[in-house]
Image (cartoon, rainbow, N blue to C red):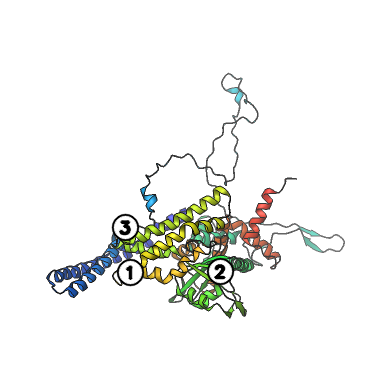
């Protein structure tokens, strides 16, 4: 958390609002708990006096449901030490390793500023015979410090010239072109604003306050104007990233809410993400329906890793030629056929909830799913150790080990007879409904076992949504989608988004057809790093 975020967390108004909201929710939960406990006590009394077996069974079922509800509300009210992180049987049996100590972390990515310290007059010290031991012999101490970012006005003063023969006036080569023709702000300024908002989730109004402390008087509208201008220059890269992701054999998809705020009203929109190993593409749409999913997956033919959302399964079932709208509004026929691989992480969550609600038999399913993940970990470890292709290792281990684990789980799902509508029943029903797509990873070694990569990719938009609450217009959703696409793609590639955006904008400003993608920029950086020094 940076300084600005810490200060924001200490904002009195924000803290008071959060405290009031928490107090209201706590009071509500306590009241609901009291009602549940009162009802639970009445039912227990009725069960004790009931003589009819059917009545006893019905009362026992209702009591179990009330206990589940009460446990869920207590976890929300008081918190819970249990989470999704659950070790496998093999891992739980192992003794915990003692964490070794560590020294200072090596800062290999930071630039080094060398400051040499010498004595003013060494002849006046010690025996008046002191002198340097040897050229280059120093005692070095590394310290990490911060050199404050400065906002300055660059005044470019271009000399005027007059021809002595014809009298014409000319000037020397002037200032570099600003981001907006006739404007005062440079591309560097706009890139800094974009990185702060979409990478570090710092709203524009907080940036305005920070700029004020640095001496710059600016409005949120001015900052927004710079973002829009930068968006126009980077639009080609945004579309190219989408095309790159669609060209991959395996992608992950996910969606989350996004708020669009108008005058006196607020609407729920949806952020959609399509992610591959090296790139992520975002779009923000007013719907969570098939139209938005079609625009996201337009023309894709391959494997899509998803949760159990019905829109994806409906599109998979269609698998025909269809006419959909491209991101730029051009309509045309697209081949639309893909295979869904469903997420074991989502299936696992249902059994975790069941175990937390007091269903001990859910442990069997969780143990088997944990073994599936151990096979995946083993495949990655062997691929790294041997240099063998990960896909081939997965194919071999999934055939040799995972198929047997899946068969055991399938047998357990149909042998278990849970009480209908309780959490264990819901978890088993979900797994049965998704089963054909859950086990497709066995035949698709390119696909990961879960959709965690798409869930991780969408976290940035969730953090941004919490900090700046969404967008104020449809144009704002398009700008947000572009910058989240660029920042997340750069993160996946392991490059800094700021220098990339600056170079991509510079080239696009000279020629809009000159589109630089983050993937191409990374390749250029790698080529420069290995180029021979001349």
Are circles 1 and 3 on residues that touch, CB within 8 Å? no
Mark 1: few/some/many CA within 10 Å (<14, 14-19, 20+): some
Distance of label 1 from label 3 (alpha carbons)? 22 Å
Hey, which quadrant is residue 118 in on the image? top right
Q: Which one is closest to the eye, mark 1 or mark 2?
A: 1
Left/right placement of residue 501 relative to residue 30 reads: right
Question: 210 and 168: which one is in front?
Answer: 210
Q: Earlier in the sequence, mark 1 or mark 2?
A: 1
Dividing the image into 4 quarters, which one contains the N terminus? bottom left
Q: Earlier in the sequence, mark 1 or mark 3?
A: 3
Q: Check the image and report above or below for 500 versus 98.
A: below
Distance of label 2 from label 3 (alpha carbons)? 39 Å
Is any part of residue 488 visible from this angle? yes
Q: Residue at x 23, y 71 (%)?
A: 62
Residue matched to label 2: 479
Are circles 2 and 3 on residues that touch, CB within 8 Å? no
Dividing the image into 4 quarters, which one contains the C terminus? top right
Hey, which quadrant is residue 503 in on the image? bottom right
Distance of label 1 from label 2 (alpha carbons)? 44 Å
Q: Secondary structure at mark 3?
A: loop
Residue at the right extreme?
Answer: 165
Residue 261 image position (x, y, % from top left): 46, 73
Residue 425: give its label: 1
Residue 331 image position (x, y, % from top left): 61, 80
Q: Earlier in the sequence, mark 2 or mark 3?
A: 3
Residue 391: give its label: none
Are circles 1 and 2 on residues that touch, CB within 8 Å? no
Question: 513 and 340: which one is in front?
Answer: 340
Q: Secondary structure at mark 2?
A: helix
Q: Residue at x 52, y 44 (%)?
A: 145
Hey, which quadrant is residue 427 in on the image? bottom left
């Amino acid at each position: 958390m940076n300084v600005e975020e810490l200060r924001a967390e200490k904002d009195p108004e924000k803290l008071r609002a959060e405290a009031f909201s928490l107090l209201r929710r706590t009071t509500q939960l306590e009241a609901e708990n009291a009602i549940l406990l009162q009802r639970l006590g009445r039912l227990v009394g009725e069960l004790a006096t009931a003589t009819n077996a059917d009545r006893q069974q019905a009362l026992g079922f209702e009591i179990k449901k009330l206990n589940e509800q009460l446990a869920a509300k207590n976890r929300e009210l008081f918190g819970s030490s249990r989470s999704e992180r659950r070790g496998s049987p093999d891992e739980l049996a192992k003794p915990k390793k003692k964490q070794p100590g560590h020294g200072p972390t090596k800062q290999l990515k930071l630039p080094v500023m060398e400051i040499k310290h010498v004595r003013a007059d060494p002849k006046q010290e010690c025996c008046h015979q002191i002198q340097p031991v040897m050229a280059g012999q120093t005692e070095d101490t590394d310290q990490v410090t911060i050199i404050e970012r400065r906002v300055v006005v660059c005044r470019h003063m271009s000399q005027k010239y007059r021809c002595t023969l014809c009298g014409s006036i000319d000037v020397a080569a002037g200032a570099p072109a600003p981001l907006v023709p006739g404007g005062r702000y440079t591309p560097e300024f706009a890139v800094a604003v974009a990185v702060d908002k979409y990478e570090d989730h710092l709203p524009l109004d907080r940036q305005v306050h920070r700029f004020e402390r640095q001496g710059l008087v600016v409005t949120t509208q001015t900052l927004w104007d710079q973002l829009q201008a930068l968006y126009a220059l980077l639009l080609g890269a945004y579309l190219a990233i989408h095309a790159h992701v669609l060209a991959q054999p395996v992608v992950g998809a996910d969606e989350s809410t996004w708020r669009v705020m108008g005058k006196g009203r607020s609407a729920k929109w949806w952020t959609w993400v399509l992610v591959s190993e090296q790139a992520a593409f975002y779009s923000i749409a007013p719907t969570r329906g098939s139209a938005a999913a079609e625009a996201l997956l337009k023309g894709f033919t391959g494997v899509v890793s998803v949760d159990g959302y019905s829109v994806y399964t409906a599109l998979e079932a269609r698998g025909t030629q269809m006419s959909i709208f491209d991101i730029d509004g051009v309509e045309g026929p697209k081949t639309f056929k893909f295979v869904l691989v469903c997420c074991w992480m989502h299936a696992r969550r249902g059994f975790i909830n069941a175990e937390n609600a007091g269903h001990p038999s859910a442990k069997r399913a969780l143990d088997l799913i944990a073994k599936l993940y151990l096979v995946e970990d083993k495949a990655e470890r062997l691929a790294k150790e041997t240099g063998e292709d990960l896909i081939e290792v997965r194919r071999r281990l999934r055939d040799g080990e995972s198929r047997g684990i899946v068969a055991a789980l399938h047998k357990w799902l149909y042998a278990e007879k849970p009480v209908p509508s309780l959490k264990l029943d819901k978890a088993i029903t979900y797994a049965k409904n998704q089963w054909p797509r859950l086990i497709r990873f066995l035949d698709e070694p390119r696909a990961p076992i879960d959709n965690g990569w798409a869930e991780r990719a969408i976290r940035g938009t969730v953090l941004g949504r919490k900090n700046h609450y969404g967008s104020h217009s449809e144009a704002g959703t398009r700008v947000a989608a572009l910058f989240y696409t660029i920042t997340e793609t750069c993160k996946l590639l392991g490059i800094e988004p700021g220098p990339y955006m600056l170079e991509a904008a510079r080239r696009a400003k000279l020629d809009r057809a000159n589109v630089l993608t983050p993937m191409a920029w990374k390749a250029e950086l790698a080529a420069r790093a290995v180029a021979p020094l001349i």
